[in-house]
Image (cartoon, helix red, strand yellow):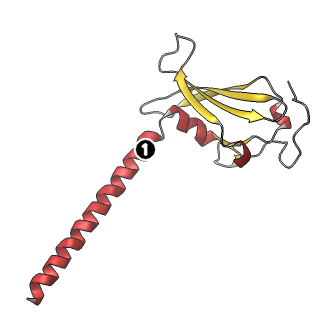
Amino acid sequence: MHKPAWQLLKNVLLSVLAFAAGAGWLYVIYNEHRSKEPMEIVKKHFVFYPEYSHGSWREGQCASAGKEKCREVTYTIPLKACGAVRFDWLVFPAEDAEATWSYNGASPRIDESKYPLYAVLSEDSRLVDPPAVGKPLPETCQFK
């Protein structure tokens, strides 16, 4: 009687371990697939500070019809004295290679050096803070 109980426990533990290993691999595959999505590519390079991280993200086809596989990613936040400010990126996802992207800037064209909105991930994977970190927000909207 003792041996069949041990055998059952061993089978249950092996089943649980196999399920956990399978779930782990599914999680890795899902994250790999998700990391190639245009919005995730932008979020990987631009990290908005907590007070500006509750904006709305949108992804759509690029306005220029000639750009194949191009996706436009926008992020809109309310900014004191400026109203709604939209940030625009063009992302060219690639299946096998590293995706390319370009930052088009904010609309309206604010002077981003005056606002501590986001940090940028540099080539060596370090966050680069904007020059305005630690400074108070301007009272009036600062345009370029």
Amino acid type at mark 1:
Glu
Image point (33%, 56%), residue name: 23
Image point (74%, 29%), residue name: 84
Q: Which quadrant would residue 19 be assigned to in this image? A: bottom left
Whether residue 121 is visible, yes or no, is: no
Task: Please indicate whether residue 68 sits to the left or right of residue 27 in the image.
Answer: right
Residue pushed farthest left?
A: 1
Figure check: 66 above or below 121: above
Whether residue 43 is visible, yes or no, is: yes
Provide the secondary structure element on which disc 1 rests. Answer: helix
Residue pushed farthest right?
A: 139
Image point (48%, 16%), residue name: 68
From the viewer's side, name the closer residue of 117 and 130.
117
Figure label count: 1
Q: Where is the N terminus found, in terms of image quarters?
A: bottom left
Image point (88%, 46%), residue name: 135
Figure check: 6 above or below 75: below
From the viewer's side, name the closer residue of 125 and 23.
23
Q: Position of residue 54 (x, y in %)?
A: 66, 42
Q: Where is the C terminus found, in terms of image quarters?
A: top right
From the viewer's side, name the closer residue of 18 and 125.
18
Q: Position of residue 109 (x, y in %)?
A: 79, 23
From the viewer's side, name the closer residue of 14 and 96.
14
Q: Residues within 10 Å of mark 1 (few under 14, many from 20)?
A: few
Task: Please indicate whether residue 25 sits to the left or right of residue 119 in the image.
Answer: left
Q: Position of residue 128 (x, y in %)?
A: 74, 45
Q: Position of residue 73 (x, y in %)?
A: 58, 28
Where is mark 1, residue-wise? 32
